[in-house]
Amino acid sequence: MSGSPALYSPRLLGLAVTLADYPIGERMTLSESVRSRTCGSIVTVAFDPSDTSKIGISASACAVGQAAAAIFVADAEGREASSISAAMDAIASWLDDNGPLPDWADIEALAPAIPHKGRHEAILLPWKAAAVALSKGVTAG
């Protein structure tokens, strides 16, 4: 038995169930769905185009992917696409053991997934979907 923490901890499972607090509403038409090539997880992030602080999310994923989606949506309010993309890069580096703990609330709950490389892409899906969705709402000026 290894000395690494359990992947499916009570904390991670508790985070996963909070996704129900962020449904995708009818007015949330600025959206993007992305799929993990490694595990097939799908995450959809949607914003109200008139108020992008209103965020909905759905995740067809394992508990790790669902927890990542919950962690994303709980701290994403008011962030712009560039901030979300920078956070995604920092999280990817952290997951690859090349970077410090990213500045995103509760992200440390995903630390047990670091040795599980097959989960990394699913973890990053919410940030990727949100960055693409928000970039759709940018108009040339």
Image: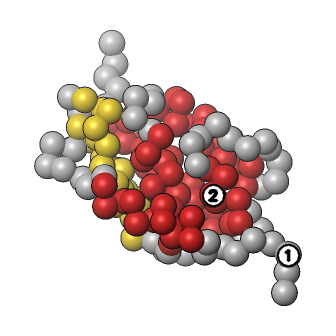
Q: Position of residue 132 (x, y in %)?
A: 42, 42
Residue 100 seen anywhere in this rendered image of the structure? yes
Amino acid at pointer 1? Gly
Q: Which class describes the residues within 10 Å of circle 1: few (<14), some (14-19), or many (20+)?
A: few
Left or right of residue 139, residue 34 in this image: right
- The furthest residue to the front: 10
Q: Secondary structure at mark 2?
A: helix
Q: Quadrant of the C terminus?
A: top left
- Residue 125's mark? none
Disc 1: which residue? 3
At 64% across and 59% down in the image, what residue appears?
Answer: 110
Mark toward the start of the polypeptide (1 vs 2): 1
Q: Nearer the viewer, residue 12 or 45?
A: 12
At 52% across and 36% down in the image, what residue appears?
Answer: 84
Residue 111, quarter of the rendered image: bottom right
Amino acid at pointer 2? Ala
Q: Quadrant of the N terminus?
A: bottom right
Disc 2: which residue? 109
Measured along the vertical axis of the image, is residue 40 above or below residue 75? below
Measured along the vertical axis of the image, is residue 82 above or below residue 5? above
Q: Nearer the viewer, residue 120 or 13?
A: 13
Q: Secondary structure at mark 1?
A: loop
Q: Quick check: marks 1 and 2 in contact, CB under 8 Å?
A: no
